[in-house]
Image (tube, coloured by chain):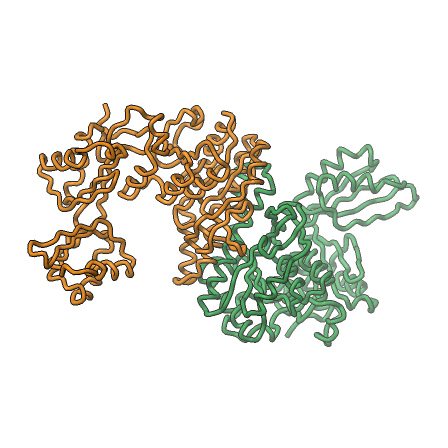
Chain colours: A orange, B green
């Protein structure tokens, strides 16, 4: 079980979490719980580090910020004890959670589960601070912001858990954003790949890294709400969304739609470079300098011109990076050799995602037709095996999501 | 060097501390720094534990409260780095600081200094969170409130430091409380024994445990102000008070007065039991039940009655415990066999302290005469090798301290 910062923010909330955990134990489970710091606490600690030194040493930063989860792990153990449960905290260096030495963005290598399993088998609930680990030379690391989801999946893999339940602010993964489409439905299950595609296009329910790890280690992850009634039946009844492998999906959700969900990302900006010379290495001269400036390029579409001597290159960058991208490209104009740069800061990416499209033709054409019928202009298209994304005007994003949600038969009652 | 919570309370103050530490390194020293949590932080964390469970598990309490010093140790390392120093934090479990397993009040057993000394020899400033340690089975301990002074002395002993500088809210140890006697003088030096006597009678400059440890390990401790100008010469000029052994004292302070200081403790209450049967074991029936109730009895004076069949027993307890002491003794009246109990909540203990009195007669009589001359009535007397204490009316305490300060020639210019 994993609880985030909102669930750990203060005595009353931690008491509720303890109640939810206790019910899982009463339902017959051995339980390990991974916790985040109280919401706001990590920001407070990061701020102290920045004030100390804007170019802070990440090794000492890790010592400071890892303390937030240490506090909540001890407190949850105390709350569980107050409810009559046996419980103890296991800090990152105690298990230990071994990571590489990339401080502030470490990656988990192994988790020693022997003592942990013995403690759990003896009926003790294990409370583990998320986000933290230990290098080979005995120094504290953290996994980067939001790393507690990854810690939870890693612990679940280490103890070969039946399930990794991640309690969040939402009660599951939806076919689309319920704030846009009132008829959005909660999904019973999604595959790891679908979740990754949905996450990367804006459904930030889980940290992407944690989903990749779950896929690699084949950990069954459930996303569910931490605001459930603490006296409700234990989560074996699977009230949330299960994230599982392709194989397992079949058994869980027979009547699944072809398309799993529709995601929208409004934080995109479009750049068009016209009449780029059509020669080997031309594209590298565009994207090399952007990568060096840490600008994350997303969709890339290249149309060869009619005379086959030049080409137009369209791509998107995060809106926040548009100005930086423009100045990088202007500096490189002579080298790249494009004629003109056009930018549009007001575009949005709409994606339809679903493993079903692998075996079904026509998914993309349904999308194009539905949008065309409502007069929504498609500015660019990109596809992957389980996703079709289009770029449209940002003002039309809500309309487009609603139209597609209906077109793919996702509207609930 | 050790800095308390007031010195570590926030970015600006930690930056000042870093400046003071840096100057010590520039003066040619290898430096280890022990830090407290930001002032208020430990209280905040203790409160979370109490809210979780009033009968909290001290092992988990230790996990929670030890985080406060972890934060400040990382931050001071970052601030030192910002000033161009090499620095790193060493958490209790990293050194490790081995303690017994008496959680929340652990005692330090050993500190492994090998890695620490190597790091310091390489020019790295070591920043060590006070108050925390590690049990043999790898769990976090804390030393009890105020334990950072003890951590500092233990680290100084482990690295065989030339000096342990403890930066506090005051700039040294005075002949008496400067708020009572304007002419009180800062002492250049006191012995461990004197410091213990002064501490136990109310001059709470240092934690008593840390002084005992310094005496045992023969660590030279300097008390000095953390509010010194950070650009002032490094503390080799000894602006504070040195706490040293008897032997060393001679060399440091030739012109030392017979009496080192005068301490007053107003938080005393007096209990008189009259006509206690004068038989073996009678005293045990009084003090046994008080000890079981955790009431700390201080002065005990027993006068055998004229007929040698009974005796009056006078003793003091902390004012806060008087009511509890009364009810314990009333319950035991039949067993103890005293005739009457009289109590006085408004008494104070005045002590004159000085190693010089070992070799000089007349110290006590000077005290009695000086008080008698001003009409101050002595209610009880107790003496140790380097201390004479008297019990007087609490209303007369300021007058008594001033009179004695003058009588022993301690008044400054």
Q: Is residue A95 visible?
A: yes
Instruction: Measuring from the top left, give residue B102's x and y in whole percent.
Output: 66, 45
Instruction: Measuring from the top left, give residue B325's x and y in whole percent.
Output: 72, 40
Residue B89 horizontal side relative to residue A373, left or right: right
Instruction: Measuring from the top left, give residue A110's x and y in whole percent.
Output: 49, 46
Instruction: Measuring from the top left, give residue B250's x and y in whole percent.
Output: 75, 74
Viewer-side residue, B155 vs A28:
A28
Q: Is residue A177 visible?
A: no
Viewer-side residue, B386 vs B26:
B26
Q: Quadrant of residue A404?
A: top left
Residue B263 horizontal side relative to residue A379, left or right: right
Q: Quadrant of residue B381?
A: bottom right
Which residue is at 10% across, 35% downward? A374
Viewer-side residue, A405 vs A266:
A405
Q: Is residue B99 above or below residue B169?
A: above
Q: Is residue B308 above or below residue B380?
A: above
Which residue is at 80% across, 42% downward? B273
Give the quarter of the figure containing the C terminus of chain B: bottom right
Which residue is at 26% across, 38% downward? A386
């Amino acid at each position: 079980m994993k609880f985030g910062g909102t669930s750990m923010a203060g005595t009353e909330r931690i008491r509720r979490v303890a109640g939810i955990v206790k019910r899982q134990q009463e339902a017959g489970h051995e339980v390990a719980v991974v916790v985040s710091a109280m919401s706001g606490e990590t920001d407070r600690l990061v701020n102290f580090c920045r004030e100390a030194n804007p170019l802070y040493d990440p090794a000492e930063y890790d010592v400071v910020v890892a303390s937030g989860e240490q506090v909540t792990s001890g407190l949850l153990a105390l709350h569980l004890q107050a409810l009559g449960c046996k419980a103890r905290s296991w800090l990152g260096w105690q298990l230990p959670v071994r990571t590489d030495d990339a401080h502030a963005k470490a990656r988990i290598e192994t988790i020693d589960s022997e003592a942990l399993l013995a403690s759990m088998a003896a009926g003790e609930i294990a409370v583990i601070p998320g986000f933290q680990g230990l290098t080979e030379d005995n120094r504290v690391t953290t996994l980067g912001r939001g790393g507690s989801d990854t810690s939870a999946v890693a612990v679940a893999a280490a103890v070969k858990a039946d399930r990794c339940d991640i309690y969040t602010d939402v009660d599951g993964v939806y076919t689309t954003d319920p704030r846009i489409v009132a008829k959005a439905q909660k999904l019973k299950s999604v595959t790891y790949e679908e979740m990754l595609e949905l996450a990367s296009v804006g459904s930030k329910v889980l940290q992407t890294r944690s989903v990749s790890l779950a896929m690699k280690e084949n950990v069954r992850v459930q996303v569910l709400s931490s605001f459930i009634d603490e006296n409700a039946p234990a989560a074996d009844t699977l009230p949330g969304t299960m994230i599982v492998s392709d194989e397992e999906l079949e058994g869980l959700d027979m009547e699944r739609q072809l398309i799993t969900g529709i995601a929208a990302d409004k934080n995109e900006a479009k750049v068009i470079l016209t009449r780029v010379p059509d020669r080997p290495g031309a594209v590298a001269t565009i994207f090399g300098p952007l990568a060096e400036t840490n600008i994350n390029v997303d969709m890339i579409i290249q149309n060869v011109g009619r005379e086959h001597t030049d080409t137009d290159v369209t791509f998107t960058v995060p809106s926040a990076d548009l100005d930086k991208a423009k100045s990088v490209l202007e500096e490189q104009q002579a080298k790249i050799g494009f004629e003109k740069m056009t930018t549009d800061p007001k575009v949005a990416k709409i994606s339809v995602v679903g493993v079903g499209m692998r075996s079904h033709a026509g998914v993309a054409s349904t999308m194009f037709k539905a949008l065309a019928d409502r007069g929504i202009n498609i500015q660019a298209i990109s596809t992957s095996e389980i996703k079709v994304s289009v770029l449209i005007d940002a003002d039309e994003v809500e309309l487009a999501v609603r139209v597609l949600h209906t077109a793919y038969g996702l509207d609930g009652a």
